Image (cartoon, rainbow, N blue to C red):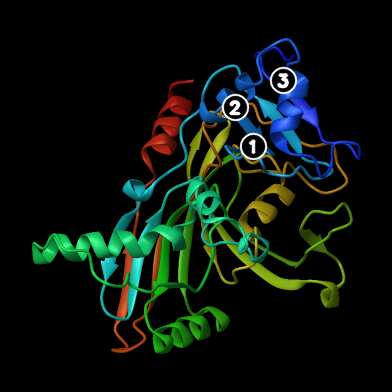
Amino acid sequence: MRRDGSQVVHVRESDAGQLLIALLRRLQPDTPASEATQLLRNHRVQIDGNLCEDGRRRLKLGEVVKILPHAIAAPPTAEDIRVHFVDEQLVVVEKPSGMTTMRHAEEANWSGRRQRRESTLADVLPAVLAKSARSSRDKQRRPARLPQVTPVHRLDRDTSGLMVFARTSAAERSLVEQFREHSIDRAYLAIVSGEIAAQSIESFLARDRGDGKRGSVSDPNAGQHAVTHVRPVEVVNGYTLVECRLETGRTHQIRIHLSEAGHPVCGDKDYRGPFGHKPLLDRSRAPRLALHAAELGFEHPLTGESLHFESRLPRELADFLRQLRRT
């Protein structure tokens, strides 16, 4: 038991492959079996920092299961998705933190009930668009088929902010090509530890930097070229609100670059400083990963019009920033 009242278990070889519900019952032998189910329903179980409600999820070696003393916020739903722009070719939305962009290949065979329990943005967006269309036409009848949407890029589960989905094959091809050519204008807001100076960070990012995590490597042939332009916006009592503008868009690029520069993003549990050094402690008490996709600009795939969208810091991060100012 930790000081905060939580209980933490590191999944060992003997636990790998077992159901989560079995582990929870074993950890509480003196309580009714239903108590383990209540922990899941009351949002008191996390795996690797993410809320988990699925007792039939099989554990993997090295995962960290945490039982919280109190319930945490429920995962986001369709009601938390904000549509910024929609036409027949594409839709721009604001993804809430805590929701994955799309389903991974290994999740394709999940039952319908399990998929609904852990819905992705790609899962719920068609219904959001259909509901909006019904409201605009003042019709109550549900359409025979939900609108089709295709994600052309991703945001990390705990990152919030602007995303674009294609609604036609032609739009998908055009947007994918724009991402491939790095002509998409993308800027993120992040709150990081320490006072970071304006700089451009350039490296080669690999899937495994040597410890099983993504990171920069010295061999250009072993990684993908990645460039992040960092501009401090506000220094706040030992922390900095920064704007990160992407020249390339690699997986976890901003989080890795800021961490390797010695200024990890507040709330980041994976990247806590330069590889090979002792991980930097996060004393910020951030409510979640303090990273938000604040700007998105691209060329409309059909008309060629230049489109640009902006999004403010979500309330929980804005409140966190105000708290830092008062500290």
**What residue sits 50% from the left and 38% below the top?**
235
Q: Badge 3 local density, few (<14 within 10 Å), some, or many (20+)? A: some
**Which element is circle 3 on?**
strand
- Mark toward the viewer: 2 or 3: 2
Q: Quadrant of residue 299?
A: bottom left
Question: 107 above or below 152?
Answer: above
Q: Is residue 226 left or right of residue 91?
A: right
Residue 121 position within the rendered picture, expressed as x and y whole percent measured from the top left: 45, 58
Where does label 3 land, which residue? Answer: 7
Task: Give the CA separation, mark 2 to mark 3.
Answer: 16 Å
Q: Badge 1 local density, few (<14 within 10 Å), some, or many (20+)? A: some
- Any part of residue 192 in sight: yes
Q: Nearer the viewer, residue 155 or 115?
A: 115
Give the residue at the far left of this rendering.
138
Q: Quadrant of residue 163?
A: bottom left
Which quarter of the image is occupied by the N terminus?
Answer: top right
Task: Give the CA separation, mark 2 to mark 1.
Answer: 7 Å
Where does label 2 land, which residue? Answer: 37
Residue 160 position within the rendered picture, expressed as x and y whole percent measured from the top left: 46, 50
Sequence order check: which comes first, mark 2 or mark 3? Answer: 3
**What residue sits 48% from the left and 87% below the top?**
173
Asked if the residues shown at circle 2 and circle 3 are in contact, with their CB atoms under 8 angstroms apart, the answer is: no
The three-letter code of the residue at mark 1 reads Gly
Sequence order check: which comes first, mark 1 or mark 3? Answer: 3
Where does label 1 land, which residue? Answer: 55
Residue 238 position within the rendered picture, expressed as x and y whole percent measured from the top left: 58, 31
Q: Badge 2 local density, few (<14 within 10 Å), some, or many (20+)? A: some
The three-letter code of the residue at mark 3 reads Gln
The three-letter code of the residue at mark 2 reads Thr
